[in-house]
Image (cartoon, rainbow, N blue to C red):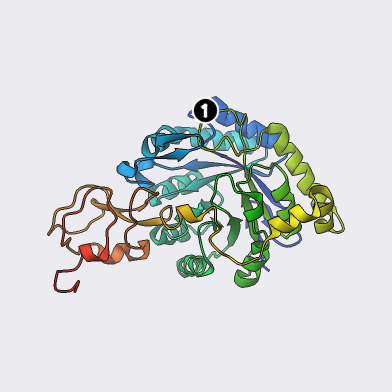
Amino acid sequence: MRVIRIGERKIGEGEPAFIVAEAGSNHDGKLRQAKKLIDIARSARADAVKFQLFHADSLYPQRVGKIPVGSVTTDFYKLLKKNEIPRKWLSVLKEYAEKQDLQFLCSCFDEESADFLDDLGIVAHKIASPELNHIPLITHVAKKEKPLILSTGLSLLGEIEETLLTYQKHTHHGQVVLLHCISAYPTPLGQCNLNVIRTLKLVFETPVGFSDHTSDPTSAPVTAVAAGASVIEKHVTLSRTLPGPDHSFAVEPDELKRMVDLVRTCERSPDPMKFARDLIGRQKVKKMMGSGKKIISPAEKPLYPNDKRSIHAIRNIERGEPFSRNNIRVLRSERNLVPGIHPRYFDMILGKVATADILSGEGVSWNMLLSEECSH
């Protein structure tokens, strides 16, 4: 099992868990609030704080429509647009975090954002679960020659394998941390399937962590560490009563501190799994551990494959028009749109001609590239 480095920090077997406070978009568009999230991470003695650099246009088609978010149904594109982090904040937040001895991390969701973060001096690139199949982005990030932290929700072993093979093909660095993850918000404790941590270690021989989306502050993180997790990632908020998509299942300041304390106590225990069972309860731990088979969990099925990436039109395309970077993009579909062709084929279809009119936002299918004679 490899031990890798994120900045000065070693991650892997025999090393303390690398604890990441996921600030995400819980800044709510306020720089002061973003800094408070960093303060919370520092006070709790987390190792890192992480934000997300995304652009709504590079995540979803504008006509993604309304979807349930918490207790309300909202125009998802407009919600994402509202929660974009201003780029000018990132150097400020990075400096602020590093002055408090926190590693500053930030997820990228498109190639241009990866370039920006690389120029900012980010020490590792983080790819979220829905982007795991974004092969053009994985290829682009690999060439940065920095460690990769890859979340693996909404995926099967073969999909993870393709991503890792792509990454290894385009880098000399090759340092990867996989994060087991259930992409459901919140994740039911009984679907955590933490034995997958061991499965991923066995199959891919790389450090494996856990990105926790349960609303329980401590049960899954402590059990994950007992099961061998090298990284724990947990959303943090000032208050779960705040509006926004990620507040309701995040931990509050006192809860994050307790989570970190319990994780460290578990690590020091002579029998970490016994510690977890005594703290949480044998039956509860058993349910969280699961089968160890890397499956799409019941809670994830409504999002699979629609929340993964595929090729979509980003404006109306007329029959006879060539496909180009100006009219197609690798985007998520969500539940209102039909996914298009897998992103691995993006470069291959550039220059080919549309054989049907395609509406903006529509998934590009193979039939839209084939003549009527070829499609029969």
Above/below status of 46 relative to 281: above
Above/below status of 202 relative to 187: below
Quadrant hosting residue 179: bottom right
* Residue carrying label 1: 31
Residue type, numbered disc 1:
Leu
Quadrant hosting residue 290: bottom right
Residue at 51% of width from left, 66% of height from top?
Answer: 164
State the quadrant of the C terminus. Answer: bottom left
Q: Residue furthest left?
A: 320
Q: Is residue 121 left or right of residue 275?
A: left
Q: Is residue 163 left or right of residue 253?
A: left
Residue at 58% of width from left, 44% of height from top?
Answer: 186
Residue at 65% of width from left, 65% of height from top?
Answer: 292
Which percent across, then down, holds residue 38? 62, 34
Which percent across, then down, holds residue 208? 64, 60
Label 1: element kind = helix
